[in-house]
Image (cartoon, coloured by chain):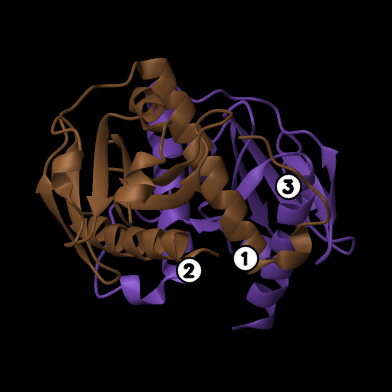
Chain colours: A purple, B brown
């Protein structure tokens, strides 16, 4: 694993811990649609879907040509970066989270762009199936046997 | 853990493996409402909610005074038992799954009693939040720190 990816994952860990403290559950590496993979997807107690992209450095952000595609798959979109990141690079109409491997803080709340009900329903179901499948394979690795679950 | 509970959990494991083979993800020990705890809740690719109660023996079934309360929390309700269980005890308008610790087989499909859309939405969201929280605490036990997530 490259150092940049490893750094991004540690930022995601801090964000996930912080969001759990706000009663928001998360999944890492979620695929809302073919060709898209978000770093962290969150589900709030009210059923809002949040997406958080974690950027370890300027190069990590500049290489990302897909992030605008994530906007239509969430109610709120955030960047998560560490204290050394040049935040002026980031669009200021997204949310902003300051993160380290152990915790995080929401510096700027993302504006709300509500999902259509049918998409929210579909995404929530995908989230549920994805989480349960990963959990199942952790608690009973022998359940795998080549099954592939659709999300 | 009593032998009866341990036996029930092994039956649940076999059922969960079998359902995963049918692309149905599951969670163990799910609480749909205060005072109710189902052995296994499943979520199908179409978004149907299944509940499976695992009974290890006659006494296990006879002690269960709550199962009728589960019917209003699922689209389909099943019993799961092993080959030694006296199946004539079970109501024949429920589904029936023959299980062992390694696999299972659906002997009788449960009739469908569709959930109201609002309840299905709420249950799917609870399922998602429950699964993600359990998964999070497995992959990052230090995330716990006394947080309690509402479902």
Q: Are marks 3 and 2 in contact (CB under 8 Å)?
A: no
**To which residue does mark 2 refer?**
A139
**To which residue does mark 1 refer?**
B138
Above or below, comparing residue B124 to residue B53 in the picture: above
**Mark 3 element type:** helix
Q: Residue sitting at 63 percent across and 58 percent down?
A: B136
Above or below, comparing residue A59 to residue B69 in the picture: below
Where residue B11 sits in the image (x, y, percent)?
32, 61
Q: Residue sitting at 84 percent across and 58 percent down?
A: A103
Cα separation between marks 3 and 1 = 14 Å
Q: How many marks?
A: 3
Cα separation between marks 1 and 2 = 9 Å
Where residue A60 sits in the image (x, y, percent)?
66, 66
Left/right placement of residue A25 relative to residue B31 reads right
Residue A50 visible (yes or no): yes
Let me know if marks 1 and 2 both belong to one chain: no
**To which residue does mark 3 refer?**
A20
Q: Are marks 1 and 2 in contact (CB under 8 Å)?
A: yes
Which residue appears farthest toward the left when viewing the image?
B107
Foreground mark, 3 or 1, reads 1
**Mark 2 element type:** helix
Give the chain letter at badge 3. A
Q: Residue sitting at 56 percent across and 42 percent down?
A: B129
Q: Residue sitting at 48 percent across and 25 percent down?
A: B122
Give the chain letter at badge 1. B
Answer with the quarter of the image where residue A35 lies: bottom left
The crowding category of the residue bearing disc 1, from other C-alpha atoms within 10 Å (few below 14, some 14 to 19, many at least 20), is: some
Q: Report the front residue among B2 and A28.
A: B2
Which residue appears farthest toward the right when viewing the image?
A83
Q: Are marks 3 and 1 in contact (CB under 8 Å)?
A: no
Answer with the quarter of the image where residue B34 lies: top right
């Amino acid at each position: 694993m490259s150092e940049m990816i490893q750094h991004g994952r540690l930022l995601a860990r801090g964000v996930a811990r912080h969001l759990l403290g706000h009663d928001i559950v998360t999944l890492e590496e979620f695929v809302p649609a073919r060709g898209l993979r978000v770093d962290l997807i969150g589900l709030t107690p009210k059923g809002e879907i949040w997406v958080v992209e974690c950027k370890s450095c300027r190069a990590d952000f500049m290489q990302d040509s897909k992030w605008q595609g994530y906007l239509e798959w969430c109610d709120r979109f955030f960047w998560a970066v560490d204290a050394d990141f040049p935040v002026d690079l980031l669009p200021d109409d997204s949310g902003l989270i300051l993160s380290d491997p152990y915790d995080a803080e929401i510096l700027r709340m993302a504006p709300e762009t509500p999902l259509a009900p049918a998409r929210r329903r579909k995404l929530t179901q995908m989230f549920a199936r994805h989480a349960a499948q990963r959990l199942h394979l952790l608690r009973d690795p022998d359940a795998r046997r080549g099954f592939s679950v659709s999300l």
